[in-house]
Image (cartoon, coloured by chain):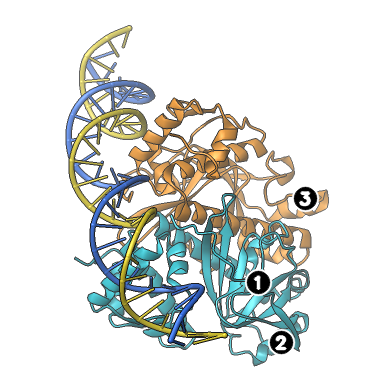
Chain colours: A cyan, B orange, C blue, D yellow
Amino acid sequence: MPHQPQPQQQQTTATVHDLRARCSACSMHQLCLPMGLNELDMAKLDQIIGRRRKVPRDAHLYRVGDPFTNLYAIRLGHFKTHQINPSGDQQITGFQMAGELLGMDAISTDRHHCNAIALEDSEVCEIPFARLEALFAEMPTLLHHFHRMMSQEITREQSVMLLLGNMRAEQRFAAFLTNLSARYSVRGYSSTSFQLRMTREEIGNYLGLTIESISRLLSKFKKQGWIKVNNRELELLDPATLKAVAQGTQSCA
Amino acid sequence: MPHQPQPQQQQTTATVHDLRARCSACSMHQLCLPMGLNELDMAKLDQIIGRRRKVPRDAHLYRVGDPFTNLYAIRLGHFKTHQINPSGDQQITGFQMAGELLGMDAISTDRHHCNAIALEDSEVCEIPFARLEALFAEMPTLLHHFHRMMSQEITREQSVMLLLGNMRAEQRFAAFLTNLSARYSVRGYSSTSFQLRMTREEIGNYLGLTIESISRLLSKFKKQGWIKVNNRELELLDPATLKAVAQGTQSCA
DNA sequence: CGCACTCTTGAAATCTCTCAAAGACGGTGG
DNA sequence: CCACCGTCTTTGAGAGATTTCAAGAGTGCG
């Protein structure tokens, strides 16, 4: 079980820049909250969106127990969210990238239930949730899309449960790579060549494996000719096979 | 890894009774969707709530791929939801009881992503989602509580991720029992004495363990004097210790 | 150039699974 | 009312996957 108390990263706190965000001008608006809105509605949404906020690498966007006031839309960069249980073990519950929403788990109790940390220098848009909810009354399209996003998060987590509950190490890791690949693809980046923004340890923690297992898996996949690795630089040489491995259809000797 | 293709239960399909539900008259209304609504708002909600529907034991409430039109509030009984991956393995993603909402994962794609099956003869209220969403425009309290419920589901799933990713068998099982206990308590039932509605196999599947492991765990806990078991009848003799085990603070020799 | 950190690799230990058999339980039919 | 059957459960022994422990190699930064 991976559970190092994870040392002293995260001293810094996110800096606040008073730049007003403009959804219409944002490259993510087709993936993000304003998806499918017309010009007029997007302008209304723009009006309630708060500051744009830079979050340096390793800084917390929010911490467990922080009062909940904003959701955050990632404009740029990558985050991880993790939970900590009473005995201090942590479990990374997700890696988020541009266009994804952070903080939805906090609505239920008005306090954040996990920590969100930037994996690299990043930028988010603050979305004051009370104002957003008020806006829903006059913007059914926005409301519906918001529900879709929450629902998608539920679905995503169910997939992770399937992964953690049912899959062997090899399968989990292939599923992880395949998932990253698909998400980069949607964002217009290469689906076969990208940088891992997280450490081996973070991958292992997320997948319920140890750092050593991840390292071995990486070596094994490399030896099979399925991937090419150089530190964090990753290339998927055989995405089809990886997908098959993820689905349990195939496995290596 | 537990993954029997799970045999032929579930032939039957849920029967539809044309009884109109009345939230105000329902014993679950303090836990369920109408929580916190005033009389007037509750009456409005009543008007859109669809039929009350009986779901016999082992019957599907919905299946993967079914078009999404309704959420379901459980009035009575217990359900399980499970996912099936391409290679046919299944993972139970949750056990739901009265007052809980089913189907929220379907909003994102307008299709159900999992199967929902009654663990005993049960009863649900159909909630046509389109009508519900329309109602939100005029009932901010309802909307907010709905968001809380979705958020709570996200939080719940994150806890399961922590469980599956970080905990040993003993800890998982103690956490499972503790969780059931708390949920029965909230519903006004005994927190220390209740019936398991699911088979050992289902528990194992949910917790990422085999049926044999669950059986051994049950025996071990019994030997420790923490619980008393008789088939599905369960009594928690030492809830405090069980909680400690769940948190990883304690463990048995 | 050296330190701190991350990553890789090997060998042994451990947990949980798999396989196997026997024991309960509940329902059915004689 | 009892015997029988299928299903679920319990328990044991051995196997296997992943972890743990340990050491060494690589990388980046000051």
In this view, the mark in front (2 or 3): 2
SS for dot 2: loop
Tell me if residue B42 comes above or below residue B120 in the rendering. below
Same subunit: marks 3 and 1: no
- Residue for badge 2: A21
Contact between marks 2 and 3 (CB within 8 A): the answer is no
Residue type, label 2: Ala
Residue A190 x %, y %:
41, 88
SS for dot 1: loop
Q: Which mark is residue A11?
A: 1
Tell me if residue B2 comes above or below residue A44 in the rendering. above
Tell me if residue A43 comes above or below residue B8 in the rendering. below
Give the residue at x 65% y 92%: A25
Is residue A41 in view from this perspective?
yes
Image quarter of residue C7: bottom left
Image quarter of residue C23: top left
Residue A18 x %, y %:
77, 86
In three-dimensional space, the C-alpha distance between marks 2 and 3, rounded to whole angstroms, equals: 35 Å
Residue A108 x %, y %:
68, 57
Give the residue at x 69% y 45%: B31
Residue B16 x %, y %:
53, 46
Contact between marks 3 and 1 (CB within 8 A): the answer is no
Mark 1 falls within which chain? A
- Residue for badge 3: B36
